[in-house]
Amino acid sequence: MPPAEKLDTHHKALTLNLDASAFGSFAEIGAGQEVSHWFFVVGGASATVAKTISAYDKEVSDDLYGSGSRYVSRERLQAMLDKEWSELLAQLSANRGSHTRFFSFVDTVSARNFAGTNDAHGWVALRFQMQPGGPANDVLLHINMRDPSNVLQQEAIGILGVNLIYSALYQSQVEESFLAGLGEDVLKERIEIDYMDLRGPAFESWDRRTLLARLVVKGFAEAVFFPSKGPPVPPTEALYKKALVLAPGYFGHGDPSHSRVHMRLLAAAIQELQKELGDAKVAPAGFFCLTAAALTPNEPAPEVPDLLRRIDALLAAGGDVLLFRQRELYQMKTLVSRYTQAPVRFALGLSLMIQAFEGIYGNLDGRLLEALARLLAQNVRIYAYPMSSTELRDRLKGISASGWEWSETNGMVSADQLRHAPPLGHLYAYLLASNFLVPMQIPATLKADA
């Protein structure tokens, strides 16, 4: 049994080497053999390492794992995992199967290139047995590497790999312990885990949707993606090189009628962006955006069940959802800018737009001006939808926003009817005049339903 106290990477690798029941193979592509390296340097690796391989050459990799897939992809990772596992069992089950918990660790990674121009990310997987002769269990991860150099990224991959093997073999009975062990020494600043898939009886009681949400809540990821159709994928696969409409909100009403309204407003914003793009062949993609952070400094952060309730209502209506760790619009824009340089449009109601102006930006030297500069820097605009005067007044009381005045038309207030005293009023007028802030009309379908 491993020791109960928290261990560093050295002692985790040594503990595994001293465990006579754990034995496995390593196949690592793209960032050196950083995981297997740990088991060699701490001593006693012959008790843990059956084989280690690094198929860097593309022809060699294709010969081993098949051609036709991208080299840093889930498809390549799955091919590696299946082949290494089947070979491990075929070669060693007869002699060691009765007393050995086998495992296969694989990764395929694009670490930072010399010029620093690539997307530093990768896929990592582990297949393992909880007891000798037991069924296989899988953990698949998509990771983003945040270190500024190739050497540091390789080091972080090594730590993550040791964490994964140790947590799977010793800490997978409890979800919180597994996640905590997985992120030790590499969480947030070094490696981001924005996708996780678990398979096998070791995880049969775990809820996959809850796990994805916890990746954000616990700080493993800046955002995760919940699709309305098909299985979850990493955010990069949903956002890559696409023109985007992001619709942030609280979405507290989970009833179908409210969800249909949200869907129609999002569809109208997508249509508006499509008009801007003209004859572009690829239609813009739209996403509802929720945050795992508290909406105001005086509120507690939402609990995972509440987040999932709101997400499920949007998914049931046919909407795709991004769950972000942070609430600020410029933070959301920074995240999606990793994956696309195409136009990005935020679709907001007036109260949420005002909340962005009233936000506390003490973490930025330039406060509101810097937040707006970051938000609107690269082909970003805000589509602002009108609200009823009564609802707007109630919402502004809830966020303690003062100084805003407006005129109204038939009880409705649009973005160009809002006013604020200088100097904020000058900034607001500039955004309107410069078309950074675009007043939208209520879709005709909603008017007809009213």
Image (cartoon, grey):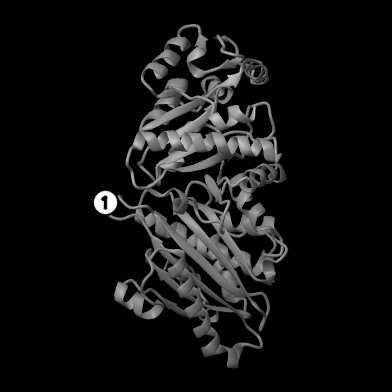
Q: Is residue 410 left or right of residue 332?
A: right
Q: Which quadrant would the C terminus be assigned to in this image?
A: top right
Image quadrant in which you'd find residue 376: top left
The location of residue 310, given as percent across then percent down, is 67, 41
Residue wearing tag 1: 115
Q: Is residue 145 left or right of residue 22?
A: left
Q: Which quadrant would the N terminus be assigned to in this image?
A: bottom right
Instruction: Work out whether residue 289 can be spotted.
Output: yes
> How many numbered marks are there?
1
User: Callout 1, which amino acid?
Assistant: Ala
Name which residue lies at 55% across and 56% down: 232
User: Eyeballing the image, is 85 above or below 403?
Assistant: below
At label 1, counting other C-alpha atoms closer than 10 Å, the crowd grade (few under 14, some 14-19, many 20 or more) is: few
- Of 224 and 22, the residue lying toward us: 224
The location of residue 276, given as percent across then percent down, is 36, 33
Name which residue lies at 59% across and 27% down: 447
Q: Is label 1 in a helix, a strand or a loop?
A: loop
User: Eyeballing the image, is 391 above or below 285?
Assistant: above
- Of 272 and 314, the residue lying toward us: 272
The location of residue 326, given as percent across then percent down, is 55, 37
Name which residue lies at 69% across and 58% down: 207
- Of 257 and 174, the residue lying toward us: 257
The location of residue 267, given as percent across then percent down, is 51, 38
Q: Residue furthest top?
A: 421
